[in-house]
Image: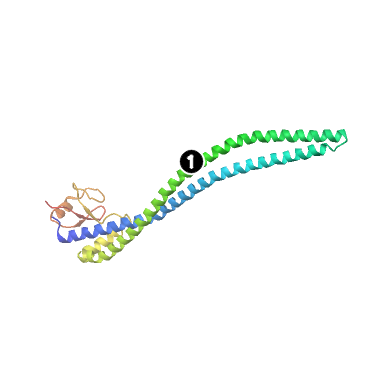
Amino acid sequence: MLDAELSALLILQDADMRKRGMETRLTVLPKEMDAIIARRDKLNAATAAAAEAVKKEELAIKTGENEIARLNDQCQKLQQQSALVKKNNEYQAMLAEIAGNKEKISTIEEELLVRFDTLEALKAEAEKVKKHNAAELRAARSEFEELLAFSKSVKTELEKLAAQRPKLAAKVPDELLASYERLLKGKDGSAPVAKVDNGCCGNCHMRVTMQTMNELSKGKLVSCDNCQHLLYMDGE
């Protein structure tokens, strides 16, 4: 059965470890939120790129159609002009230009047939990307909001722990509290008080000496010979 002093110390340690864990969690939250923002931007960029590919193909088709219209208009004007030409060489030159324009029109029409198929494929892909990314964006937004809510709840809990700590610390004897506080500031971040289990320190897992075991068996709180952490042992 744990005595009152040790029980108070372990309650204080539990609060401090929870506080440390939450503070550590808060330090990585910004990176997690930045990662979600980066994912959101990547999804938006992919959706925009798919839509831009459709626009680019539509523009190419429009350009081709305009060129066909221009060549047809030019052919019509040449045919009208050819009726007024009296010199045979000029007439033949006009006919050759008309034939050349019709050949260009035929080539562009063949290209447009391919582009129409490409456009349909791009539209289908853009719609697929849009739907998929919309779902991913909703998930990312939900994750971000959850992190915001979690951050708020953690900060609230930290405020409660900070307010409670003086009362918890007051129940621990000054000398014991000083040793505990010194260990709490250690760089390894481990709990200052550890339970001996099967003759080994619960912190460094090294076997404790017989002398230490004897002291512990008397219900005393002693330091580990290896890591200096405070040790205790449940009595039967």
Q: Along the horizontal axis of the image, is 16 left or right of 128? A: left
In the displayed structure, would residue 161 be above or below residue 41? below
Q: Is residue 19 above or below residue 114?
A: below
Q: Position of residue 19 (x, y in %)?
A: 30, 58
**Image position of 56 (left or right of 137):** right
**Left or right for 95, reference 193:** right
Instruction: Return the residue at label 1.
Output: 128
At 21% from the left and 65% from the top, the residue drawn is 175
Residue 223 position in % (x across, y down): 22, 56
The residue depicted at 58 percent of the width and 44 percent of the height is 55
Density class for disc 1 (Cα within 10 Å; few <14, some 14-19, many ≥20) is: some
Q: Nearer the viewer, residue 23 or 225?
A: 23
Front in this rendered view, residue 70 or 111? 70
What's under tag 1, amino acid-wise? Lys
Q: Does residue 28 appear anywhere in the picture?
A: no
Figure quadrant of the N terminus: bottom left
Q: Secondary structure at mark 1?
A: helix
Image point (54%, 45%), residue name:
51
